Image (spheres, helix red, strand yellow):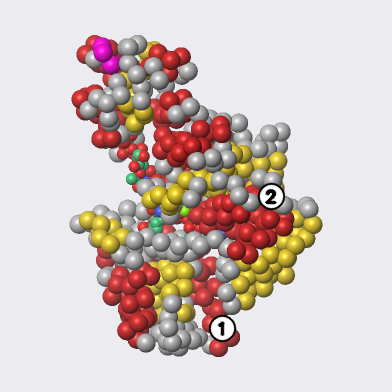
């Protein structure tokens, strides 16, 4: 695309033309190749404008900046490079990327999921439902990304607009008509999702997390709420909301633009679960909907997954699936790695579960489910957890309290300490456990801690390994090392057997 043609499609404050062809878009100078347009944006840690020279040296054909000073330097010193001064770096990144890539976002019906917990699971379930009626999909989220049948690694829950649009464009090439993505509060706040037209927006729930970034629950909620107002787009066509979460009432849904569909387990909403039965390896419930009542069966366990199934079913219905189609897909389940994943335990009689619970609310739900599963034969619940470093410190003692209140034994360990001192994080969480009076064993090394947790168990007990789920690394101050809860637990169980 010619730079001048691109300029004609953008709202810019000022621009300088140059006879250059644009092949692609980048926001990180380290990724620039010849022919790219570099969009410089201001971030929390640094400012892309500091890297203009580096980008040009690497072959940037044009630069878009939100800094008047940087723009003046470009005009004076780099006349062969196209330049544009814009009002907002990140918004322009989305506009430039969409224009250069030929607007793939207009060719996909996008369903977006936000909320504290359940985004990944709900997104996987919805994608499975859409795929089961042979629609080709793009999936973007925490664990991995899907482009039709292709699975790619996921660098972020919600990548920058440029990267989202590139995946959308690949999806369009393989015939995708649908996209399902998680929209994290960070991404909504930073407007990484600027200009992505959302057809169905889904809210799972809001409980405490990420206060290191957002500061207060109000600010965290406000970030989530942006999905329902539209981020540089009109509001979504359909808003799918959790009727049982008090925050849903405060999501201002523009009734003129958005149809509101509520789901819940407490008797409210258009999609309601009734007569829920938790059986070994299967959950059943009656789903009452505007199109009639049906019996849902799913291999997923626990109340939280009833919510996720309701959210995904409501969204799938909004995307035009029939109830029968939804039921078939729900029964087939969706493999969500690291979400209540049972580690094969051979003949030990010990149930070991790997789960991604890393908030107080998720831990409470997980432990309640563990209790439910062992209560019949009087087994114990042993919970292992840690708290992430460089993340919300205020959730640590609350997580400790949740673990202590519900469990018979707690094993406290590390979960991605990042740049922090692991024992300092553990101390903060320990305060919460101690307050409950439950016995707590501290072992900083996660592999050692998993061994202690499993060896403390007897037949009939359940061991919950919380926090890392699908993750395959431990992030330490000195670097990132391979780590896999499932593999470590499987090895310990094998030894015991
Ligand atoms: C706090 C946060 O969200 N930070 C993200 C954000 O950083 P930022 O806006 O502060 O950007 P910055 O690092 O100051 O850099 C500014 C600009 O300079 C550019 N740059 C920088 C250095 C250089 O040499 N050259 C260069 O061009 C950068 O590419 C960027 O365009 O934008 C960056 C570029 O996309 C992200 O890499 C970065 O993610 C960091 C690593 C991160 O840890 N993010 C987490 C908290 C996050 O976003 N998590 C949520 C999910 C949370 C959950 O699952 O619950 C997510 O959506 O993944
Ligand atoms: N609907 C739900 N309500 C509350 N807790 C849930 C729900 N669904 C899942 N959980 C718990 O939260 C954990 C994370 O679930 P999931 O990965 O689906 O959420 P997420 O919102 O994508 O999380 P993240 O923001 O960290 O990516 C699960 O392992 C489970 O313990
Ligand atoms: N993706 C989220 C959750 C990570 C969960 C836990 N493993 C941690 O590192 O805190 C984050 O980066 O905050
Ligand atoms: Mg997720």
Among numbered discs 2 and 1, the one appearing first in the sequence? 2
The question of residue 52 being in magenta is answered with no
Element class at badge 2: loop
User: Quick check: 104 above or below 358?
Assistant: above
Q: Quadrant of ligand 1?
A: top left
Drawn side of residue 441 relative to residue 265, left or right: left
Quadrant placement of the N terminus: top left
Q: Name the residue under label 2.
A: 321
Q: Which one is in front, 163 or 303?
A: 163
State the image quarter where residue 326 is shown. bottom right
Q: In which quarter of the image is residue 328?
A: bottom right
In the rendered image, which quarter is residue 472 located in? bottom left
Q: Is residue 211 visible?
A: no
Classify mark 1: helix, strand or loop.
Answer: helix
Residue occupied by mark 1: 375
Residue drawn at (46%, 14%) of the image: 8
Q: Does the residue labelled 1 lie within 8 Å of ligand 2?
A: no
Looking at the image, which residue is at 46% across and 25% down?
A: 99
The percent position of residue 144, horizontal first and vertical second, equals 43, 52
Q: Nearer the viewer, mark 2 or mark 1?
A: 2
Task: Please state the extent of the stretch shown in magenta in the rendering.
Answer: 79-83
Residue 234 visible in the snapshot: yes
Task: Please determine whether, in this image, residue 20 is positioned above or below residue 137.
Answer: above
């Amino acid at each position: 695309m010619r730079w001048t043609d691109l300029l004609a499609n953008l709202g810019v404050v000022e621009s300088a033309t140059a006879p250059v062809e644009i092949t692609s878009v980048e926001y990180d100078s380290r990724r620039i190749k010849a022919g790219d347009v570099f969009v410089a944006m201001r971030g929390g840690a640094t400012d892309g404008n500091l890297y203009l020279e580096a980008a040009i040296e690497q072959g940037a054909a044009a630069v878009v900046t939100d800094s008047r000073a940087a723009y003046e330097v470009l005009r004076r010193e780099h006349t062969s490079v196209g330049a544009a001064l814009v009002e907002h770096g990140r918004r322009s990144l989305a506009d430039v990327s969409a224009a250069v890539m030929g607007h793939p976002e207009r060719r996909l019906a996008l369903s977006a999921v936000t909320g504290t917990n359940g985004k990944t699971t709900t997104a996987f379930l919805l994608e499975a439902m859409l795929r089961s009626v042979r629609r080709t999909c793009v999936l973007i989220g925490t664990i991995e990304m899907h482009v039709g049948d292709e699975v790619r690694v996921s660098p972020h829950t919600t990548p920058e607009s440029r990267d989202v649009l590139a995946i959308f464009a690949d999806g369009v090439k393989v015939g995708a008509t649908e996209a399902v993505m998680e929209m994290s509060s960070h991404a909504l706040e930073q407007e990484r999702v600027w200009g992505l037209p959302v057809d169905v927006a889904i809210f799972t729930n809001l409980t405490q997390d990420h206060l290191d970034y957002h500061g207060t629950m109000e600010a965290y909620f406000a970030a989530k709420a942006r999905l329902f107002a539209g981020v540089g787009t009109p509001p979504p066509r359909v808003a799918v909301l959790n009727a049982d979460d008090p925050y849903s009432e405060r999501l201002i849904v523009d009734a003129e633009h958005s149809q509101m569909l509520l789901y819940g387990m407490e008797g409210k909403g258009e999609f309601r679960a009734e007569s829920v039965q938790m059986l070994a390896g299967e959950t059943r419930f009656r789903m009452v909907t505007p199109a009639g009542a049906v019996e849902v069966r799913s291999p997923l366990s626990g109340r939280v997954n009833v919510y996720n199934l309701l959210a995904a079913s409501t969204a799938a219905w909004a995307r035009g699936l029939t109830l029968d189609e939804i039921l078939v897909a729900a029964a087939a389940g969706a493999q969500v790695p690291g979400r209540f994943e049972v580690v094969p335990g051979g003949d030990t009689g010990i149930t070991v579960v790997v789960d991604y619970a890393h908030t107080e609310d998720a831990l409470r739900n997980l432990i309640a489910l563990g209790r439910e599963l062992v209560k019949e034969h009087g087994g114990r619940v042993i919970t292992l957890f840690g708290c992430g470093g460089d993340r919300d410190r205020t959730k640590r003692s609350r997580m400790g309290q949740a673990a202590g209140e519900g469990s018979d034994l707690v094993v406290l360990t590390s979960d991605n300490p990042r740049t922090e001192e692991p024992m300092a994080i553990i101390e903060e969480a320990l305060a919460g456990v101690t307050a409950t009076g439950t016995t707590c064993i501290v072992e900083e090394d996660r592999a050692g801690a998993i061994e202690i947790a499993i060896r403390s168990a007897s037949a009939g007990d359940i061991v919950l390994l919380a926090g890392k789920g699908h993750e395959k690394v431990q992030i330490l101050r000195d670097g990132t090392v391979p780590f896999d809860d499932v593999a470590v637990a499987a090895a310990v169980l094998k030894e015991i057997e």
